[in-house]
Image (cartoon, coloured by chain):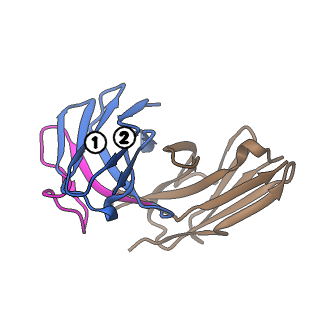
Amino acid sequence: KQEVTQIPAALSVPEGENLVLNCSFTDSAIYNLQWFRQDPGKGLTSLLLIQSSQREQTSGRLNASLDKSSGRSTLYIAASQPGDSATYLCAVLGSWGKLQFGSGTQVVVTP
Amino acid sequence: SAVISQKPSRDICQRGTSLTIQCQVDSQVTMMFWYRQQPGQSLTLIATANQGSEATYESGFVIDKFPISRPNLTFSTLTVSNMSPEDSSIYLCSVEEGNEQFFGPGTRLTVL
């Protein structure tokens, strides 16, 4: 059974610092990995999708890497801003055809 | 990317009653998914809804408690039946496009 873990569970940084969020998964037979952002009490916003054949994806200040063999993905957010404060979730789509979510990292960026 | 809307956005209900949540997508999709997010928790898949067939439920979820309708390729409903305070959660629908999943804004349900 696939297990997805996100460390740390919570993170607080001053504005301007880079954020590094980690996601690990136990079964490397995945189709893709997706990073989401969730604001309190709201739905999920898709940030980046990395296909299993890719090593990384970039969008603006966001960069996500994928190392399938070691079961890890890292989301980097450069030059953090208070508006980046949210919970970040990773999810893997496996051969079982369903999305398996991690428990999330709650990020606070202080002005 | 698909644009998904949900109604209601939030509700407060009495125990023993039922609530139906609607999910509308701006394009035709084969599969729609319903998730539950309990307070402080991550997302758990309730069921997958295909148009024209019965929904497929995950372990721990049953049709009598969470009946789902999928009358066409752009719309689905999830009913939370005979509610108890343990059903207080955010309920989200999602769709898949090109292996990427998109989510609606969620329905925040509080059961008293």
Q: Position of residue B53 (x, y in %)?
A: 12, 44
Residue B53 within the segment the image draws in magenta: yes
Chain that the image shows in blue: B
Would residue A74 be seen by someone viewing this image from the given angle?
no
Q: Is residue A70 left or right of residue B96?
A: right
Q: Which residues are magenta?
A: B43-66
Residue B49 within the segment the image draws in magenta: yes
Residues under numbered marks 2 and 1 in contact, where contact means CB atoms less than 8 Å apart: yes
Q: Is residue A64 left or right of residue B82?
A: right
**Tint applied to chain A in the drawing:** brown
Would residue B2 be seen by someone viewing this image from the given angle?
yes
Q: Where on the picture, by quarter, is residue B45?
A: bottom left
- Residue hosting label 2: B95
Depicted A66 relative to depicted B77: above or below = below
Chain for disc number 2: B
Calculate the distance from the C-alpha at mark 2 to the C-alpha at mark 1.
6 Å
- Mark 2 / mark 1, whichever is N-terminal: 1
Q: Nearer the viewer, residue B111 or B23?
A: B111
